[in-house]
Image (cartoon, rainbow, N blue to C red):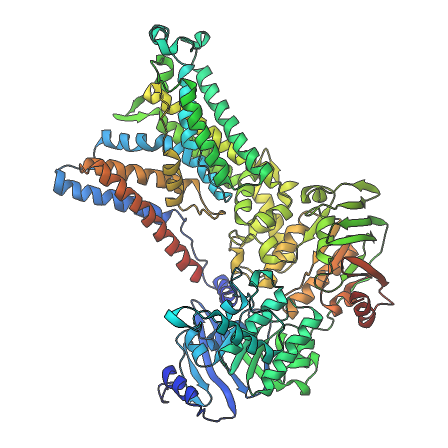
Amino acid sequence: MSAHSVVSPHTMQAVRESGAIPNSTYLLEVEDVRKEFPGVVALDNVQLKLKRGTVHALMGENGAGKSTLMKILAGIYTPDSGTFKLRGQHIRLKNPLDALQNGIAMIHQELNLMAPMTVSENIWIGREPKGRFGLIDHAEMNQRTEALFERLEIGIDPEVKISTLSVASRQMVEIAKAVSFNSDVLIMDEPTSALTETEVHHLFRIIRSLRAEGKGIIYITHKMNELFEIADEFSVFRDGKYIATCASSEVTRDDIIRMMVGREITQMFPKEPAVIGDVVLSVKGLTLNGVFRDVSFDLRSGEILGFAGLVGSGRSNVAETIFGVTPASSGTIELFGLELSVSSPAVAMRHGMALLTEDRKDTGCFLLLDIQENAQMAVLQQRYVKMGFVQQEELRRAAGDMANRLRVRTPDMHEPIINLSGGNQQKVLICRWLLTNPKILILDEPTRGIDVGAKAEIHRLISQLAGQGVAIIMISSEMPEVLGMSDRIVVLHGGRVTGILDRAEADQVKIMELASR
Amino acid sequence: MSEVTNDLGSTSRAGLKKVRRLPPEFSILMVLIGIALVFEIIGWYMVGESFLANKQRLSIIVLQVAVTGIIAVGVTQAIITGGVDLSSGSMVGFIAMVVASFAQTSLNARAVFLQPGYAQFGFGWFIDSSPFWPILMGLLLGLLLGWINGQIIARTGIPPFIATLGMMVSARGLAKWYTEGQPVALLNERFTWLGQSFNVAGFPVPRTVIVFFIVAVICHIALSYTRYGKFTYAIGANPQAARVSGIDIGKHLIKVYAVAGLLSGLAGVMLAARAQSGQPNMGVSFELDAIAAAVIGGASLSGGIGRITGTVIGTIILGVVTSGFTFLKVGAYYQEIVKGAIIVAAVVVDVHRQRKKSRA
């Protein structure tokens, strides 16, 4: 690196401000980037070349090194070695502020907005326009925000508090904030994971207009169809190594998967035939005031019942009510022919139910505790306890076996769960519920944010369980997943069931129709 | 992203040798030893004698903190659930009064009853009775008050800080109301025996200290090896996930606060026996010492983290500091000033250490 003349960020900033931005084919060029963490090589001489006016997707399984690379680009990590060229000039970023001043902005997966403050205050924090006496000029600030929003076609009032906005709107504010730095390089980390279809379209419109302005966008996603829709080029990483860069028009879905996992994944949704038995769960007229109304359906043993619908359609709420997290206002739940008042999750569990919740961090993991403790927490209600004492040995064996069966990758069950990747955390949570031997298993977004390999494993497992006679409700936002796995599909919209489709008659169009009616 | 680095980090650890983790109390034990050594060295220079090589002093160090230690063991459990118990000090005061009133001696009781303020007061039946009754009363009363704390927290959902703050004020009021502010003194010897010391190889060992360690061992086992313990950590670590895992949070919190109350009751019994009286202002600010001990010992006020072993070491640190300053003849005012600073410093060091660990 020292062989080249390194231009300091301040010089670059001065150059940028003077308007004399040197031209080069690549907006951003990193080569031979290496980053080691104690005992592990996170990035092994990788490269990334971002052209002007393109959307460049980063693909790879969890743990491939995408996030580390992204953090290096955003100045959060410093690479151990490698060259870093911005607009053809060598630079070295010292911290995230440095990156911002050089025109590299990152939109994090976890949104970093201050909820009790207004939209404008959030966008201009630290850069507020000052009026007389050095006080903040709110009118000017709101005007600037309006101008910015107009350019991006965002219809949000600059003066409302962030806390009143939906996740999608917050995402838009984050993007507007990144754009407000006049950034040339925008890094987006799974920006659509919490957005509905229409919101995704809006986001893509914004991305296209930014691309037309000549900005470079680095886009991280696990969703294959987004890649084909929005990305011009993509780079694949695997185990910290750079694999390839291609134009997205030149490859197929299977090519990409092969590059990502390094092997062929023959069947994405390995649905095994299962014997569908008697009705085990019958829900009639289930209502939770203000959330959903009059939901009725039957679930049979061995059946996988898919729940489809847009975010906010009440899918997860129905699941939580059946499991007793939020008891119903009216309606009945019949389990094995017996009507039951499910007033708490403990009641549901006693009757053989299990619920894998949607949000791993909020309602799933005990992040402070280790894998063993996380896996055993539900089954302790029922077994492995004698006179109040936990039967450590038996439980360790049972949890260990289950973890092996699910291929949780860890050297030690006493590793803190926070050290595992998202996919492995999810497997531990599935372990937690399988240890209770459920007869009815409700899975809310079982593969969200999980890489392709682990996804296929989880799908295979779901299929196996159904084969063993477990009745399964699977909620998913991913249409191919719902279509590929379910025997029947319940579609919800606005808190009502708008249709129940059989596997044979269901397709993407029908579901979308019912889901947006 | 930390996810990436940590994931790979753990995989590589499987290939290399397994990293041996020191128990989390190790650093705080080092702090204790460090503080003791500092007093030892300064002692030789300034006072001309050893701080540690003094049986009487060692005995006093533990005796001073044994009562707060018993409370701290209960408070630690409340802290692990993400709560706190502010009422323990006042409960100790009230319960010590009640316990004392059940443990008076005939001769002295008569003397007390002759005083005008006591005319309408007294438990004649219990005079010179077996110490079983005052102990039982103390424990039951503690259990009851703690159970009330738990019920209020579980049923109303108000923060434990507020619920136990209310109990703290009320219990202090009860302590004063019980005898209209008069102390209850002159207790029978079979009861005060509890507060005495006995000799082990020339070492005076106070029975209060024995009780403290038994309580600590039982609660350590309960937290580490029982379902009660697992649920306690789970609720503190993530109450929502605990609920979805089928844990009845309300029911469990009632248990935890009842245990904390029971231990406050036990502390009240031991204090009354040691002081051979019950006084309405007993146990003032004990709750703060107990919380400080738990926090110095590594418990996190945001819940999910904390161990009894740490709390015991934290308690002893407080005792060593107090006793060390007295040994160096530092004035009482200075003692308090420095004690506050030490509490904050200990936690700062711990927070810093945690942050470093999570980054590694």
Above or below B212: residue A197: below
Nearer the observer, B159 or B19:
B159
**Which residue is painted at 85% across and 52% down in the image?**
A277
- A162 relative to B283 in the view: left or right: right
Tag count in the figure? 0
Q: Position of residue B270 (x, y in %)?
A: 38, 24
Q: Is residue A496 above or below residue B67?
A: below
Residue B82 location (% of width, % of height): 50, 45
- A221 vs A112, left or right, is right
Q: Residue at x 87, y 67 (%)?
A: A504
Image quadrant for the C terminus of chain B?
bottom left
Position of residue A390 in the picture relative to residue B20 (left or right): right
Q: In the rendered view, would you say B332 is above or below A118?
A: above
Q: Place residue B105 in its image quadrant.
A: top left
**From where the camera sits, is residue B278 visible?**
yes
In the displayed orientation, state which residue is furthest to the front. Answer: A132
Name the foreground residue: A376 vs A24.
Answer: A24
Residue drawn at point x = 48 percent, y = 26 percent: B142
